[in-house]
Image: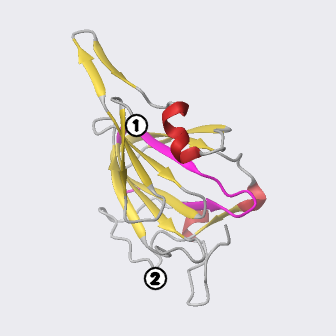
Amino acid sequence: MDRFMKSETTAIHDLVVVINDTHTDPRGMFSRLYCNDILKEYLGSRQIVQINHSITYNTGTIRGLHYQKPPHDEMKLVRCIKGKVWDVTVDLRKGSPTFLKWHAEELSPDNMRMMIIPEGCAHGFQVLKKNSELIYLHTTPYTPSAEAGIRPNDPMLEISWPLPIKDLSDRDRNHPLLTENFNGIDI
């Protein structure tokens, strides 16, 4: 990478955390949020085709766990630009060495961390600080017919959310629970 961006591997196969360095002086702060030349190592031939922004008002709120089914599966780059969230990725890829494992990172503007989430993984987050804002860069446009998700409190995953779960959308509350017959998503 370079002096402004460094990467760390995680326990989830192909899930990467990018840590941005900042330059601070009396005028303020500078940080590189995205650089195609540096991130092409992870993006390969994929291109960023959509950028989304979310604001979540209340602590404890969970958004997710969401993914898109093939052939509309997507890689996501997720960064918190205000507040603080506990960001979770769940590996749903059939045959993956980390199938049904999850990894979480605290994301905030202070720690300048970004998750690079591979295709076939579900993503969600819990707000740790009111009015948290996230920026998502996607390699595939949103396709309503490919939309899918799993419940953030699915007992098969045993995700240890840091706060009591509240403010789930009806959609997130009603995603089907995983069963023993779920063998993953073909990527």
State yes or no: residue 63 in magenta: yes
Q: Amino acid at mark 1?
A: Met
User: Badge 2 is on which residue?
Assistant: 156
Above or below — where is 62 with respect to 18? below
User: Residue 12 at what x, y percent from top left?
Assistant: 43, 65
Label 1 and label 2: CA atoms lie apart by 36 Å
Residue 72 falls inside the magenta stretch:
yes
Looking at the rendering, the stretch of residues picked out in magenta corresponds to 60-83
| Quadrant hosting residue 7 | top left
Find residue 1 and name its label. Answer: 1
Report if residue 63 is visible in the image.
no
* Image x and y of residue 49, in percent: 68, 38
Q: Quadrant of residue 147?
A: bottom right
Query: Is residue 145 toward the left or the right of residue 25 in the image?
Result: right
Earlier-in-chain disc, 1 versus 2: 1
Q: Nearer the viewer, residue 153 or 157?
A: 157
Amino acid marked by disc 2: Met
The chief SS type of the magenta part is strand
Q: Is residue 11 above or below residue 132?
A: below
Q: Nearer the viewer, mark 1 or mark 2?
A: 1
Q: Position of residue 57 (x, y in %)?
A: 43, 44
Q: Residue at x 33, y 29 (%)?
A: 3
Residue under the image location 48 percent in, 59 percent down: 14
Q: Residue at x 56, y 90 (%)?
A: 180
Question: Is 110 on the left-hand or right-hand side of 52?
Answer: left
Vertical placement of residue 73 versus 175, above or below:
above
- Quarter-wise, where is residue 9 in the image? bottom left
How would you rate the neighbour count of disc 1 (Cα within 10 Å): few for under 14, some for 14-19, many for 20 or more? Answer: few
> Cβ–Cβ below 8 Å for labels 1 and 2?
no
Query: Crowding at label 2, few (<14), some or many (≥20) Cα neighbours within 10 Å?
Result: few
